[in-house]
């Protein structure tokens, strides 16, 4: 387990691209710099999309995990 505290969980399961990224962006707007969001998605496209989006917006990708159909992505707000 990585060393960070999850400040917010966003359940984006059932949403298809680009909605997980849109919802993540909206959630991050409400968060403080340095806070960590955990994004739950079952859209395989998000596995590529969210890390690319995070990089392009300057946010930090901490980890991508897959368990069954659920993909969990951890991002730190920059």
Image (spheres, grey):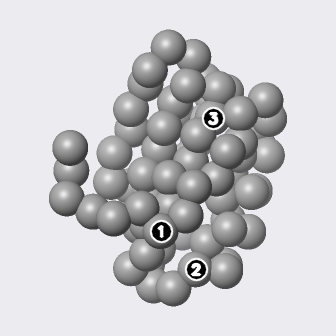
Where residue 41 is drawn, which disc sits there?
A: 3
10 Å crowding of disc 1: few (<14), some (14-19), many (20+): few
Mark 3 or mark 2, earlier in chain: 2
Image quarter of the C terminus: bottom left
Give residue 8's position: percent from left, percent from top.
55, 64
Whether residue 59 is visible here, answered yes or no, is no
> Which callout, 2 or 1, points to the residue nearer the camera?
1
Where residue 31 is drawn, which disc sits there?
A: 2
The structure residue drawn at horizontal position 47% and vertical position 44%, both measured from the top left corner, is 73
Task: Look at the numbered disc 3 and give the secondary structure of its residue.
Answer: strand
Mark 3 or mark 1, earlier in chain: 1
Q: CA distance from mark 3 to mark 2?
A: 20 Å
10 Å crowding of disc 3: few (<14), some (14-19), many (20+): many
* Residue that lies at the very extreme toward the top in this rendered image: 68
Give residue 52's position: percent from left, percent from top.
51, 49
Q: Tell me where residue 76 sits by quadrant.
A: bottom left
Q: Is residue 33 left or right of residue 16?
A: left
Where residue 7 is drawn, which disc sits there?
A: 1
Q: Nearer the viewer, residue 17 or 1?
A: 1
Tell me if residue 56 comes above or below residue 51 in the rendering: below
Task: Look at the numbered disc 1 and give the secondary structure of its residue.
Answer: loop
The structure residue drawn at horizontal position 43% and vertical position 75%, both measured from the top left corner, is 35
Image quarter of the N terminus: top left
């Amino acid at each position: 387990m990585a060393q960070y505290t999850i400040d917010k969980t966003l359940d984006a399961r059932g949403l298809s691209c680009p909605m997980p990224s849109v919802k993540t962006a909206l959630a991050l707007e409400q968060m403080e710099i340095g806070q960590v969001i955990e994004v739950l998605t079952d859209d395989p496209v998000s596995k590529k999309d969210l890390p690319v989006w995070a990089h392009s917006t300057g946010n930090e990708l901490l980890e991508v995990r897959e368990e069954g159909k659920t993909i969990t992505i951890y991002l730190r707000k920059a």
